[in-house]
Amino acid sequence: MRGGFDLYISQFVLDEAAGGDVEAARERLAALAGPPVLDLTEAGAELADALKTNLQTS
């Protein structure tokens, strides 16, 4: 819990953080360690795909 909020992370965020430079990815993943990973639902996967597509076309 941080500042009165429970923190969670998604697999989508972990996948994005793992990309790119190996050392930088290692540091990003270390910084993201700790919060529980949310279960991936079909709706969540569709949303993640839409966000990723939108970010790639921007």
Image: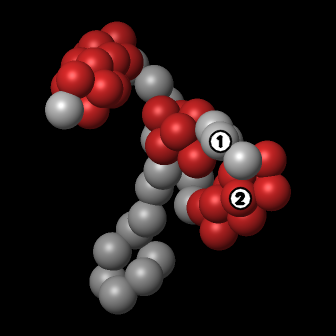
15 to the left or right of 13:
right
**Image point (48%, 50%), residue name:** 9
6 to the left or right of 16:
left
- Quarter containing the C terminus: top left
The x and y percentages for residue 1 are 46, 77
| SS for dot 1 | loop
Q: Residue furthest bottom?
A: 3
Report the front residue among 19 and 41.
19
The x and y percentages for residue 53 are 28, 19
Q: Does residue 46 sit above or below 15 in this rendering?
A: above
Write down the residue under mark 1.
20
- Callout 2: 10 Å neighbours few (<14), some, many (20+)? few
Q: Which mark is residue 43?
A: none
Q: Does residue 44 sit above or below 16 in this rendering?
A: above
Q: Quadrant of residue 14?
A: top right
CA–CA distance in space, label 1 to label 2: 7 Å
Report the front residue among 44 and 20.
20
Q: Does residue 44 sit above or below 34 in this rendering?
A: above
Q: Are marks 1 and 2 in contact (CB under 8 Å)?
A: yes
The x and y percentages for residue 11 are 54, 35
How many numbered badges does the structure rendering display? Answer: 2
Q: Amino acid at mark 1?
A: Gly
The x and y percentages for residue 45 are 36, 18
**Image point (34%, 12%), residue name:** 42
24 to the left or right of 2:
right
* Residue 33 in view, yes or no: no
Q: Amino acid at mark 2?
A: Ala
Q: Quadrant of residue 2?
A: bottom left
* Residue 24 in view, yes or no: yes
Write down the residue under mark 2.
24
